[in-house]
Amino acid sequence: MAQEEAYKPESGRERSYSKEGVLRETFGTGQCWWQERINMDRLRRERREKTREQLKKYGLGALLCFRDCNLIYVGSTLRLPYLTEAESFGPVPIGMRYLLFGVNAEKPIHHEHGAIAEQQAAHAPWLEVRHALQPLIEHVAGYEAADSCGRRFVEQIKGELEEMGVLNEPLGIDIYSPRLEEMLRDASIKVTTKGIDALNDAKETKTQDEIECMRIACSIAEAALYGVRKAIAPGVRESDLVRIMNDAAYRCGGTSYGDGFVAASGPNSWPNIRWFTDRMIRPGDVVFVDAYGVRYQQYHTCYYRSFVCGKAWPEIKEAFKKVARWQREPLDKGCKAGNTTADIAKWFPPADEWGAKTEAAVSGNALCHGMGLSHFERPLISREWSLKHPIPLRENQVFLIETQVGDGLGQGVRLEDMVRVTKTGYELLSRWPIDEIIECPY
């Protein structure tokens, strides 16, 4: 096998973490009297005003949100996991809670589920809190209940649009739901899914406080990775590593997504199983983990690192050099504001390097995805679409770059980093080194 040369970053980025040569501060997770850290008032205000700006751009009189990440972005609401669509009711929420934000309104109107409204109102003076009249979008209470409750919901929204003086203007919604659109149109409300586009545009670039949240989230994820490194040994299960990452998230002041982690060892590492089992680690196994369940102030992470239980054999070391090159070369040669997503995608290896016939077959092997309060935001970069349909890279976009490769003997390695786009290049938010694969002696 031809030996892969270690990739040398053009900018000396591994020392400075930024092409500008600036080492950015990461604050603690608490508050401090002598130091302004994350300014929560500014964070809430700037997210709300960025949303308002996009409502004006798209000609929307108001925005009606159901998705958990959008309730938080626009209204800075309490997160209730049992009512989150991804964890409970499938891709379309039934409407237990929702938020209405008028283009000229001082406060969003947040409609909360039952008695939780009293708690939310007590803690969030920036919201107008009212009780939700659930539209039961997915008929889980039966058709008659859905029709009856749906009418109450529509009358509530219609009355509030009239209060705001925007009843005759388009209402943007943040989900694709034919039934919801039909209910609103039957009440002569000009409903449109352009609310999705408005929110995508608002969230595309991050404010200074959002970026700091994500820096801190990365530091918590690094504590999780360190815990994994210490624990790897024969007999330790993949599920044990998930427990360690969950513990690190809460111990360090963050939260987690429960089982939202990857811990893959040995044969589960290639192709990447993207999950975890109760498999016990054995000597010589590659073990890679993704701490993507770690969050800080609900800002996500996605952070893969690869380890070896004991000594790494030569084929694994060569595979690691290759994937490390794929991590850094697209950033050093293509990432800066004013470039496009094609300037990054062109440095990813083509499908035939993995022995595939189409880019779709390997689109997850080398990918970038935007990150924030949700796991996939703009930009989403892949050879599959970005070479023919590029979009601009903008200052303060935050995205993840992740690559993987097999060693030819049944195992593989994967890496992932969090990146902020800057005027002249990028800031690497993740700091765990990738100069060589980490061996875990036992």
Image (spheres, rainbow, N blue to C red):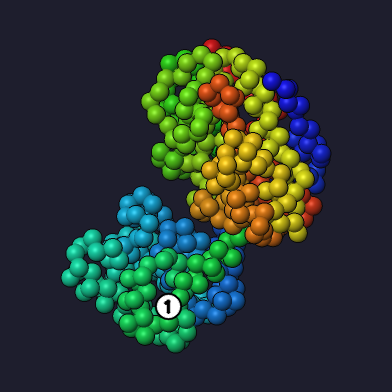
Instruction: Report if residue 231 is visible in the image.
Output: no
Q: Quadrant of residue 204?
A: bottom right
Residue depicted at 42% across the width and 32% down the height: 276
Tell how many labels.
1
Residue 202 in view: yes
Q: Position of residue 218 (x, y in %)?
A: 59, 41
State the residue at coordinates (65%, 22%): 317
Where does residue 147 sit, x and y in percent of width and height?
A: 22, 73
- Classify residue 206 as left or right of residue 165: right
Residue 117 drawn at (x, y percent) = 34, 64
Left or right for 134, reference 176:
left
Q: Residue at x 62, y 16 (%)?
A: 313
- When the figure is inspected, residue 234 is found, relative to residue 241, above or below; the finding is above
Report the residue marked by disc 1. Answer: 191
- The location of residue 413, given as percent across then percent down, is 58, 29
Q: How packed is label 1: few (under 14 Cα within 10 Å), some, or many (20 or more)?
A: many
Judged from the image, the secondary structure of the residue bearing numbered disc 1 is strand
> Please, what is the three-letter code of the amino acid marked with disc 1?
Val
Figure quadrant of the N terminus = top right
Q: Residue furthest top?
A: 442
Q: Is residue 87 left or right of residue 23?
A: left
**Is residue 251 depicted above or below 395 in this figure?**
above
* Image quarter in which the C terminus is found: top right
* Vertical side of 303 occupied by 409: above or below: above
Q: Is residue 339 above or below residue 165?
A: above
Q: Is residue 20 left or right of residue 438?
A: right
Decide which of 344, 438 is in the foreground and name it.
Answer: 344
* 8 or 433: nearer the viewer: 8
**209 and 95: which one is in front?**
95
Q: Residue at x 75, y 56 (%)?
A: 339
